[in-house]
Amino acid sequence: MLPHSLSLLQLLFLASFALAANWTATPFVPPAIPLAVKSPYLQTWMLQGTAEGSLNSGWESFRDGTIIAWLGILRVDGQPYVWMGDPQGKNTATQKSMTFTPTRTMITLTCGPVDLTATFLTPIEPTDLVNQSIPFSYLSVEVVANDANTHQVQLYTDVTGEWLISGGTQPQSDQLFQWQATTGTTVNYQFSLQNQTQFLEVGGRARYGSVVYSTTQVSGLTYEVGPDTVLRPGFISSGALNNTVDTQFRAISDMWPVFAFAHDLGVVGSTATTPVVYTIGHVRDPLVQVLNVPNINSLRGSYYLTRYSSTPDLVTALLSDYPNTLARAMNFDENLTTAAFAVTPQDSDYEDVLALSVRQLFGNIEITAGSNGTTHDPTDIMAFMRDGPTNTVDIIYSIWPALLFTNPAIGRYLLEPVLAYQLANPVQGGYAIHDIGASLYPNVTGPSNGSYPVEECGNQLIMALSYTQKTSDNSLITKYQSLYDQFATYLTQNGLYMASQYSADGFNGQLANQTNLAVKSIVALKAASEIFQILGNNDKSQQYNSVATSFLQQWQAIAISSDKSHYTLSYGDNPSWGLLYNLYADLLLGFGMFPQSVYQTQTEWYATKISNYGIQLDSRSTDAETDWQLWTAATVTDQTLRTNMIGLVKKYASSRINNLAFPDRYNSLNGQMSTYYGRTVVGGHFAPLIVSQVQGNSTNSSGGNNNGGKSGNTSGEHPIGSPVLPVAVTMLAALVYAALM
Ligand SMILES: *[C@@H]1O[C@H](CO)[C@@H](O)[C@H](O)[C@H]1NC(C)=O
Ligand SMILES: *[C@@H]1O[C@H](CO)[C@@H](O)[C@H](O)[C@H]1NC(C)=O
Ligand SMILES: *[C@@H]1O[C@H](CO)[C@@H](O)[C@H](O)[C@H]1NC(C)=O
Ligand SMILES: *[C@@H]1O[C@H](CO)[C@@H](O)[C@H](O)[C@H]1NC(C)=O
Ligand SMILES: *[C@@H]1O[C@H](CO)[C@@H](O)[C@H](O)[C@H]1NC(C)=O
Ligand SMILES: *[C@@H]1O[C@H](CO)[C@@H](O)[C@H](O)[C@H]1NC(C)=O
Ligand SMILES: *[C@@H]1O[C@H](CO)[C@@H](O)[C@H](O)[C@H]1NC(C)=O
Ligand SMILES: *[C@@H]1O[C@H](CO)[C@@H](O)[C@H](O)[C@H]1NC(C)=O
Ligand SMILES: *[C@@H]1O[C@H](CO)[C@@H](O)[C@H](O)[C@H]1NC(C)=O
Ligand SMILES: *[C@@H]1O[C@H](CO)[C@@H](O)[C@H](O)[C@H]1NC(C)=O
Ligand SMILES: *[C@@H]1O[C@H](CO)[C@@H](O)[C@H](O)[C@H]1NC(C)=O
Ligand SMILES: *[C@@H]1O[C@H](CO)[C@@H](O)[C@H](O)[C@H]1NC(C)=O
């Protein structure tokens, strides 16, 4: 035998062995399991990849893989079982199952004669700005005997200073930190770095703010702050802590101070114990500063500060509201799952992909109120997104379907600082800026000089009309109408034939005459026409409408390949191609401008381009993007292809090839992630959900070019703008949608 093929066989054997975890995963094993993911700096995950990755197979991680320790020990009849974050990886407790939903991760482990279930709940409540802005997540633990006997049980958890700053390749755990414990109706630990710098981020972590770890004061609770090597063995031997606080402030890794709680659960039998509930949060005040944007309050605090000015009050409210919060979370999960099921009733792939996307999306968006240092103004609302340059407009566009589904006002709050900047600082050339913060989050210091003129002009117009359609609130387009006019003028001059520039997919380089960007221009000019119609300016409305119509005519002739098999990536480059995902906006806004033949041609073309793990973004590289694939899936005319495209994104996400927070860009041939992980763009996965709603509502049957409700036939070649879904299912989705709004 050739050694070479032997080792290949061995590798295959080892790979299949490594995959054979003994626990069940529902719906699947993701690259990283979300545990506490509620702000850019509250990001605690359990990495998976090819390793077994049970909750007690090692330490938890920040989104980038650096360690964040969260330890859990259960003492059963005097025997210790490490059930969470086992540093020795001794696996004294055996994981049985892991289940995740959009808001929750539930893990059950057997600890000898009892089973323990840990529920990690991150509330996602976008319609309630106070709740949504609270940078806290819950852990709830319950225990039940798995034999016919009763057992004496004590529960222990602790966290380290790594929740502030962690090791990784450049260890930072030599940073000094300080802490305090407060006791009342709740027991709270609050700890922070000694040397804090406001608005400074290093290695993805904020260099200011505090971590807050809490639980309700109950009988049988003991607490203690001290060295890990004292507290952990002390609990294991006695089952309790000493209610003392080590006040020798020191470095995170200097005799590792840990912040511990122990609960004596007493005698546990076949009835599950009342859950022990903890909250963990990362608070900063101020949250961000916004420099160089005139006419706005530059100092911004978390929106929840409009209701809670003290952290202990907040924590008390959070802990007492846990049962209701859990009920609301289950309702959110149910709502989303039902809506997703309506898009692809064939299988659960779509709901599964969405379930993994939700916490990551909202964990990167912060809702703020303007602050004067002490008081926060509830009427002055803006949102900030940490994903590359702050509030990158094409990322807001990518996640727009998720915002539309949950709360379009958050979309407006993200756009507001960008538009406010531009109103005060007209950009030379009259086009839309790319973002509001070139410097590292959360120091928001003004836009980067990126060149995405057609991309961002188009995005602004499309989102402005979409927001207005959905909310019937005309104040956005009224306030910024002069900008929308400039952007439409820019597109009139540059939107069809464009100089070499970036699109949202900057990583594939610049290109002139981009077919997909021109689609965006055409839809955006039509959107401008609608905007000025609403504003009562019929002249402008007609002007932009006729440009849109004329561009569309020209585009059809220059954008298609000479053999008419597909639309090219750039005009005249016959072999080139790409996902024409901007067609989605035509459906989203209910226009149906583009002829059905365009949707049909692309659908047939995509079907020939399917690779192992999906369809690459364009002919320049084999890299694929999860968000634009799902946007495109929403535009194809064939339900089977749509289901397959969604299924391939699920296949990639469940491949166990990667081990960081849901990476969005990857090689479509081998499933290897490429560079990006933990980003908001997973919000783009909501795209098929929203278009199915538009489609379900559409009744326009007058025009051959229109995608709205042509025949009501559920089979055959309808773009998603017509009822490709069974009418009953679509109506159900519309109802769910309406209920969510
Ligand atoms: C799975 O269970 C088997 C049988 O109990 C055991 O030998 C094996 O070590 C377990 N594998 C892991 C990864 O825990
Ligand atoms: C505090 O942190 C800042 C930013 O990292 C650094 O420049 C400064 O030297 C630090 N100060 C002390 C006393 O360590
Ligand atoms: C934030 O940006 C401003 C303006 O560029 C700069 O003066 C300040 O030092 C920055 N703050 C941090 C923490 O980087
Ligand atoms: C509690 O205090 C006792 C007496 O000082 C000590 O022996 C024990 O290790 C302590 N336990 C913990 C968990 O710190
Ligand atoms: C979250 O929202 C619910 C429902 O509006 C409210 O009852 C609850 O108090 C909110 N939570 C907090 C911590 O304010
Ligand atoms: C969706 O949420 C709304 C509002 O919370 C609720 O009234 C409705 O029953 C939910 N629908 C489903 C299917 O869960
Ligand atoms: C902030 O505003 C509040 C309410 O208007 C006012 O009472 C307070 O004095 C202000 N604080 C500062 C530092 O300006
Ligand atoms: C970017 O720089 C160019 C050249 O200096 C300038 O014309 C343009 O206005 C700048 N764009 C932005 C958004 O500042
Ligand atoms: C764009 O296409 C037009 C028409 O084919 C051509 O004249 C023009 O040179 C192209 N622009 C660039 C920058 O290549
Ligand atoms: C559906 O169409 C009606 C009539 O055009 C409109 O009033 C309503 O807002 C639409 N609903 C949605 C969810 O788009
Ligand atoms: C229906 O489609 C036709 C043809 O595209 C269009 O002229 C008309 O305005 C549409 N009607 C509505 C209500 O959208
Ligand atoms: C729908 O279209 C298919 C194929 O075009 C046809 O076989 C079927 O009879 C149509 N169904 C209805 C209800 O019109």
Image (spheres, rainbow, N blue to C red):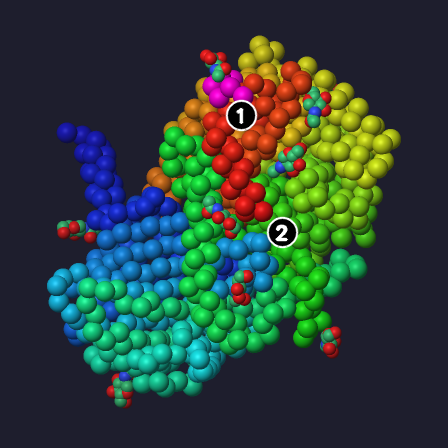
Q: Which of 594/13 is in front?
A: 594
Instruction: Give the residue type that dot 2 points to.
Output: Ile
Q: Residue furthest top?
A: 563
Image point (47%, 27%), residue name = 726
Q: Is residue 257 left or right of residue 639?
A: left
Q: Nearer the viewer, mark 1 or mark 2?
A: 1
For label 2, the residue is 410
Instruction: Give the residue type that dot 1 points to.
Output: Pro
Q: Position of residue 33 (x, y in %)?
A: 38, 52
Q: Quadrant of residue 565?
A: top right
Q: Which mark is residue 723?
A: 1
Q: Which of 250/60 is in front?
A: 60
- Whether 713 is among the magenta residues is yes
Q: Position of residue 61 (x, y in %)?
A: 39, 58
Instruction: Find the magenta span and give its range.
Output: 712-717
Q: Which of 311/15 is in front?
A: 311
**Can the viewer see residue 503?**
no
Q: Earlier in the sequence, mark 1 or mark 2?
A: 2
- Whether 490 is among the magenta residues is no
